[in-house]
Image: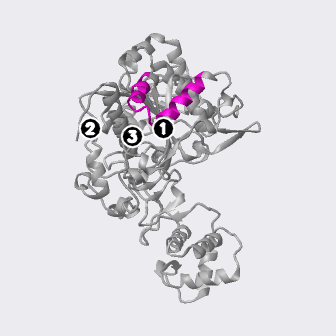
Amino acid sequence: MLNPLKEQQLKHIELFAGCGGMSLGLEAAGFELFFANELSPMAGETFAYNMLGEDLANLSEKKLSSSKVKWIKSQYPEDKLKFRLRENPFEATNGEYTDLKTIEDIRGKLLIGDIDNLLTFFNDNQKIVEEIRNVDIDLLSGGPPCQSFSLAGKREKNNHKNLLPLSFAKIAGLIQPKVVLLENVKGITSPFDEGGEKYYAWLEVCKAFALEGFVPVCMMLNSKFYGVAQNRPRFIMIAYRYDVFSRLFSSSRKNQILISSNNFYKLVKKKHNNLSDIGIHDFNYYDIDNDPELFDGLLFPEITNREGDFVSVLEAIGDIRRTEIDYNVSTIKKGYSGKINLTLKNKHHDVVKVQNHEPRNHNFGTKARFRFYQVINEFQNGLKKGATDLFTGKEIDDETKERLTLAFLNYNLYFKGTNGEFYKKPKTLSEVNNLLRTIPTKKHSQRALLEYEPAPAQLTIPDDLCHYHMENLRTLTVREMARFQSFPDWFVFRSKVTTGGDGRKFEVPQYTQVGNAVPPLLALSLGNMISRILNVMYYGKISED
């Protein structure tokens, strides 16, 4: 098998960088970051700390400006870093201040701000664009919101997110990297209605990049196949600049995947004035669940973990279950987390203690309800659904209710009495019913983790999941969620832990940073494959195992 070769230093630009999951994995695959762009200063604070070694909070306290993080637009001058870090990024777009003047304000930097402002800057500064193109960028990556994107022009006019994929494609057209890597949620493959017509956002995205000279190859992955402790399906588009694709295609002209991509590219170019004529029948993406044999490391990243070998919740967080203990990063060398810590290297800070592992406080009702969720996981499917319906106020028949209460008699539940809170196995149905009446909920998404399975994908809202262990009647810590996403223990999440109220409209706290991130181990697998293709097909370097 061909190996990615280290002698060719591959250069990388990251858009929609978030807290740094994609960049961290690509760095481990041998890519050197040329610059990154992220809208949120909160997520940017985490990116800067871990990927660039820049402590923005410390600089702001000292009233110093940052040398490695630049603002595309801001309402505050460069010496007001404290205000910039809490600035609403949607209001910053109208700011009068900018840090970008020359290529040196971009090289090796994190650029905070809206991608449309960045695109405007590039359009107004063609000399800088030419300088970036002369760098010969190997990879441009990012994960823009794409769910209702189309090129037909009838998108929700008040939703600026629907234009972000087009801005991404236009920047690719300006910079002309050899490869584009786009990551998105599974929902991008579901059709949406636009003026009575069905559109597929993933197909529209592919058209946008084809118009800019890139040939797409698309797939549906799942992180659990790449050593990540999470059942997280993700759509991936890898688009090759046409000259790079031509070299790849010339070596495998009978490959049906490449033939399909080539035909699609030519069709888009031919019908560029009538793109709505190109439909779902003209192109395809490949699903790892349906065609696992294709994921062999050649055109699709090689599978590292299969059914029966997926990383479970227990393997991911069992060794840090007790939040009252201080865990040292240097001592975590074995198992799932040990592997991640050794694979993804810390280059900037000497992190001794595992951080971001503070538990949240809960009242009795929440803890008692969490215990019920843990118990429900032990039930068979019929009873499990009945119990969930019972909690969320749905009507259930008397027979199911009686079966449920009888089942609960076999487990220690969480009670409250004159002597405090305690576990107890109920002796009568009335005890169970009385407890149930005190802890109703309208939250349909809440559940306990399944100990021996990968974690579910929905990790952006901390209240949705509780711990699997009966001694841990709590939601997950930021660190535990980061473990599921395959972040190493030295990776420190910065800014606010969580948010609420109007802050939800623009703030990106630690929990959201983790949930929105690309799992670094998945990014590593993608990076290794892209590195291999570039080294062999473009740079002409071949290495055998």
What residue does disc 2 label? 347
> How far from the left and from the top, in percent, is residue 484?
41, 54
- Tell me the quarter of the picture where residue 6 sits: top left
Q: How far apart are marks 2 and 3 (CA)?
A: 21 Å
At x 39% / y 57%, what residue is drawn?
306
What residue does disc 1 label? 256
Judged from the image, the secondary structure of the residue bearing numbered disc 3 is helix
> How far from the left and from the top, in percent, is residue 222?
46, 50
Q: Main secondary structure of the magenta part?
A: helix
Q: What stretch is highlighted in magenta?
A: 243-269
- Of tags 1 and 2, which is closer to the observer? 1
- Of tags 3 and 1, which is closer to the observer? 1
Judged from the image, the secondary structure of the residue bearing numbered disc 1 is helix
> How far from the left and from the top, in percent, is residue 507?
53, 41
What residue does disc 3 label? 526
Q: Residue furthest bottom?
A: 427
**Residue type for callout 1:** Gln
Q: Does the magenta stretch include residue 401?
A: no
Side of 86 relative to 198 (left or right): left
Side of 401 relative to 113 (left or right): right
Side of 403 relative to 226 (left or right): right
Looking at the image, which is closer to me, 95 or 407?
407
Q: How far apart are marks 1 and 2 (CA)?
A: 42 Å
Q: Which residue lies furthest to the top in this view?
A: 127
